[in-house]
Amino acid sequence: MKKVFISAVIVLLCVVVVLLFPEMSDRLTLAGLKDAKHSLSLLVVESPILSALIYVVIYICVTAASIPGAVILTLAGGALFGVMWGTLLVSIASTFGATLAFLVVRTTCRQFVQNRFISTWNKVSNGFETSGPFYLFSLRLVPVVPFFLVNVLMALTNIRIRDFFFISQIGMLPATVVYVFAGTELSKITTVKDIVSPGILAAFMLIACLPWAARFLLTRLKRNDD
């Protein structure tokens, strides 16, 4: 009952934020961000701490409610706060938002989500049963599966909340740095697809293979010791 109450409060807060910003759907686009960058930058200069707090709250609510726009908000982090602070704020906000979305699904609508994404869920379920947390780490490192979909589908597994939180934070960090850095060069971006080039995607995939390689080597070493 307590978990259901917490989830209801989270959903309510997300709805309130969305209602308070009715133009959010228009702003959460690359064009909308470019148009608003100058005025938002002035607000950051005038009230940096308050601006950062508002940014984090909006980011958390948008991701917790599984509203599309995480990429644009991440670009905004770089455009408004720079690489260092932008990466820190995005890392905190995206992880907390993802975890809240995870909790909402796990406590209120597991069956609905499973039925809604049945084909994708079967793949995720098989992957998680075979590889456990390594599978989540790989999904976070390679930004191919939509951010919100990973959040809601992992809630259907038996992964612990703590593991989901820390694995997500570490796994999302490389992509966060890339997108935040891209945000500092906002004027040069014409489409979001330009950010993740084939080379960058290949680098993500290579990084994603590292834990699997380490796991394989540890298993082989253990067998040799036995």
Image (cartoon, helix red, strand yellow):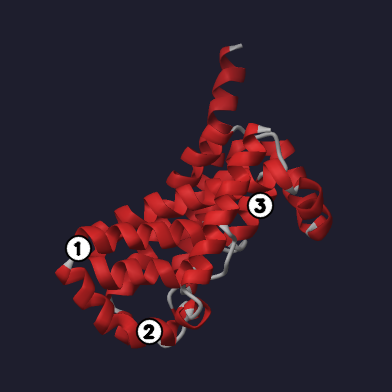
From mark 3 to mark 1, how far is it between C-alphas?
Answer: 33 Å
- Residue linked to disc 2: 189
Between 139 and 217, the one nearer to me in the picture:
139
* Residue name at image x 16 percent, y 70 percent: 45
Q: In the rendered image, which quarter contains the C terminus?
A: top right
| Element under disc 1 | helix
- Residue linked to disc 3: 152
Viewer-side label of 3, 1: 1
> Where does residue 42 sit, x and y in percent of width and height?
19, 77
> Where does residue 135 sit, x and y in percent of width and height?
62, 44
Q: What amino acid type should be assigned to the residue bearing mark 1?
A: Pro
Residue furthest to the top:
226
How many neighbours does mark 3 have within 10 angstroms: few (below 14), some (14-19), or many (20 or more)?
Answer: many
Pick whichever of labels 3 and 1 is earlier in the sequence. 1
Viewer-side label of 2, 1: 1
Viewer-side label of 2, 3: 3
70 relative to 86 in the view: left or right? right
Q: Is residue 140 above or below residue 182?
A: above
Q: What amino acid type should be assigned to the residue bearing mark 3?
A: Val
| Element under disc 2 | loop
Pick whichever of labels 2 and 3 is earlier in the sequence. 3
Label at residue 48: 1
Q: What amino acid type should be assigned to the residue bearing mark 2?
A: Ile
